[in-house]
Every structure is written in structure tokens, then in C-alpha cells.
């Protein structure tokens, strides 16, 4: 057990690290060639949720003005520094295997309304960054269910679903196979194959920073883990991503929107989310 002095020092170092992480990715500079001349465009931060609301809060506030504030949420614990999502934690048996369904699909799901689509990639470049620490059971992610549940891929953040006619994007923590413990960043535009990249493995009990960026100038989707490039996917051209179905008019944090499958729900802490475009 740590003494109080050591605990204060650890907490101070964590907060300092958190402030530094939030500053990373605040702005992105892109040089664009237009008729042979160079034009520099400043990518705007369109959403920045620092998740520092005090204990008992039920709304995630955007520091961008006027910003995108969440709808009231339930089941997510706030403490002034991080949000803790329950995810699958109430759906594992004594052996650590996923079982059953979520009691309420709204628990642990934060919805951020965005009818204008400004939190979607659209036809331009786009990036999303966050810092997270997955919950583990006996030092690992849960064992996949007995076949009555889908193979787990714990949704961290998502806009739209795979069936959305306008496309979708998501970040999810893979819960099985050779990519176990890696964050998958996937994007899909109508009429195009999906773009998929994977982070380094992050189930070591520590917090990690993940950033996924769609660079249409360089024609690449890239994901970084703690600032180090972990995966890239090149493309020659790509379509507009603007989700618009019943799950596409808002950004969801914490789980797959509307799902009751515990394998679709992220368990752990997140202490900020930032979107640039």
C-alpha cells in the first residue's frame, strides 16, 4: 500500500501527463497544393471533451464553443479527472466468460447530438484522439462467450453503424484472436471498402493515448499508440463519410449505440476525447 505522500505525487504526475496529452493534436497543419501554389489550411478542433466534470455529473461538456454537449447519461462514473464506463463488468461468470445481455442499453452509453455532421469526416481529413485504460479481469479481457454472443469487440467510440447508408467510423478494443487487446480504427464510405488499422496492444494495466487520423492529402489512414505509429492503410481515393441513420446523427462514447451485447461495451476509463477536421 502506498503512503499518502506517494499517492499525492502519483496523482500530480498523472494530472500533469493528462494536461500534456490534451495539448497534443489540438491543431493540425496541412499543406494543400492548389493549381501549383501552396495553401496552408489550419484544421479546426471541432470537439474536445476533457471529461473533468465533478463526481455525480451526468453530462459530458465540450470545451469548444459553442460545442457539442452530450445528452444526460446514466451508469458512467465521473470523478473530476476521468470517466469510468461499466461496459461488460456485470456480465461475466466465475470463470471470466462473457454471459447474458446488458440490463439496459442506455447504461454506459454517452450520446453527443450532431445533426450538422461536424463530428464526422465528411469529405475532408479527420482525426480523433483519446486516452483510455481498459478494465481487466484477472489481468486479461473477458473470455468470449459460448456462441450465443457475438465475438467481442468492445466499442469505445462510434458514429453510425455498419449498415448506415452514409458510412460510419469507430474505435473498438478487440477481444479475441491475434489482435486481442489492440484498438481497431475502422472507417467506411458508401461504395468503398472499409479502411482498417490497429494500435499496439494496450491491455497491460496502464493508460494509453490513441489517435486515428484520415489524411486525404497523403491518402492514408493512420493510428498511433502513445505517439508511435502502429498501423497505416493507404488508399488512392475515398468517398464521403457522413452517417445519417438513427444511430448516425450523434457520436456515441462507451459502447455500440443501441446494443445490449456486453461484447459491444467498453469497460474502463477515458479521460479525454478530441476531434479535429
Image: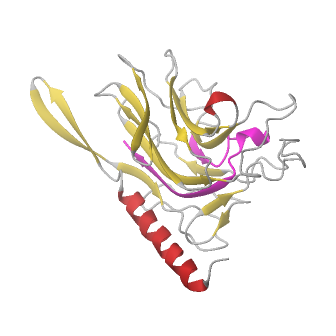
Q: Is residue 62 visible?
A: yes
Residue 81 belongs to the span the image colors magenta: no
Q: How many marks?
A: 0
Residue 32's image quarter? top left
Residue at the extreme left: 37
Q: Residue at x 37, y 27 (%)?
A: 220
Q: Pick the residue in front: 187 or 21.
A: 21
Q: Is residue 72 visible?
A: no
Answer with left or right where residue 145 lies relative to residue 45.
right
Answer with left or right where residue 276 lies relative to residue 243.
left
For the N terminus, the quadrant is: bottom right
| 80 lies above or below 75 | below
Q: Pick the residue in front: 203 or 162.
A: 203
Query: Which segment is the magenta one?
Result: 249-277
| 149 lies above or below 208 | above
Residue 273 belongs to the span the image colors magenta: yes
- The percent position of residue 182, horizontal first and vertical second, equals 58, 38
| 201 lies above or below 269 | above
Q: Residue at x 41, y 65 (%)?
A: 19
Answer with left or right where residue 130 lies relative to residue 110.
left
Give the color scheme: rainbow, by chain, secondary structure or one colour.
secondary structure
- The percent position of residue 226, horizontal first and vertical second, equals 44, 49
Q: Residue at x 9, y 24 (%)?
A: 36
Q: Pick the residue in front: 141 or 3.
A: 3
Answer with left or right where residue 28 lies relative to residue 39.
right
For the C terminus, the quadrant is: top left
- The percent position of residue 93, horizontal first and vertical second, equals 89, 47
Q: Residue at x 68, y 47 (%)?
A: 266
Q: Pick the residue in front: 189 or 219.
A: 219
- The percent position of residue 196, horizontal first and vertical second, equals 51, 27
Amino acid at each position: 500500500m502506498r503512503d499518502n505522500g506517494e499517492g499525492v505525487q502519483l496523482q500530480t504526475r498523472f494530472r500533469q501527463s493528462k494536461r500534456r496529452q490534451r495539448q497534443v493534436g489540438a491543431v493540425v497543419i496541412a499543406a494543400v497544393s492548389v493549381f501549383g501554389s501552396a495553401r496552408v489550411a489550419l484544421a479546426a478542433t471541432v470537439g474536445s471533451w476533457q471529461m473533468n466534470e465533478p463526481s455525480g455529473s451526468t453530462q459530458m461538456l465540450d470545451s469548444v464553443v459553442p460545442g457539442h454537449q452530450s445528452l444526460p447519461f446514466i451508469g458512467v462514473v465521473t470523478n473530476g479527472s476521468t470517466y469510468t464506463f461499466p461496459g461488460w463488468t456485470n456480465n461475466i461468470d466465475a470463470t471470466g466468460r462473457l454471459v447474458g445481455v446488458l440490463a439496459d442499453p442506455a447504461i454506459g452509453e454517452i450520446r453527443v447530438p450532431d445533426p450538422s455532421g461536424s463530428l464526422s469526416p465528411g469529405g475532408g481529413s479527420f482525426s480523433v484522439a483519446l486516452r483510455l485504460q481498459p478494465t481487466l479481469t484477472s489481468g486479461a479481457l473477458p473470455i468470449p462467450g459460448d456462441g450465443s454472443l457475438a465475438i467481442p469487440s468492445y466499442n469505445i467510440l462510434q458514429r453510425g453503424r455498419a449498415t448506415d447508408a452514409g458510412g460510419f467510423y469507430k474505435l473498438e478494443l478487440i477481444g479475441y484472436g491475434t489482435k486481442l487487446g489492440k484498438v481497431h480504427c475502422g472507417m467506411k464510405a458508401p461504395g468503398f471498402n472499409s479502411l482498417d488499422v490497429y494500435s499496439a496492444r494496450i491491455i497491460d494495466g496502464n493508460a494509453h493515448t490513441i489517435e486515428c487520423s484520415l489524411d486525404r492529402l497523403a491518402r492514408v489512414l493512420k493510428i498511433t499508440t502513445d505517439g508511435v505509429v502502429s498501423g497505416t492503410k493507404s488508399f488512392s481515393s475515398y468517398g464521403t463519410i457522413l452517417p445519417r441513420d438513427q444511430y448516425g446523427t450523434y457520436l456515441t462514447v462507451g459502447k455500440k449505440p443501441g446494443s445490449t451485447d456486453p461484447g459491444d461495451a467498453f469497460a474502463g476509463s477515458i479521460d479525454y476525447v478530441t476531434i479535429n477536421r
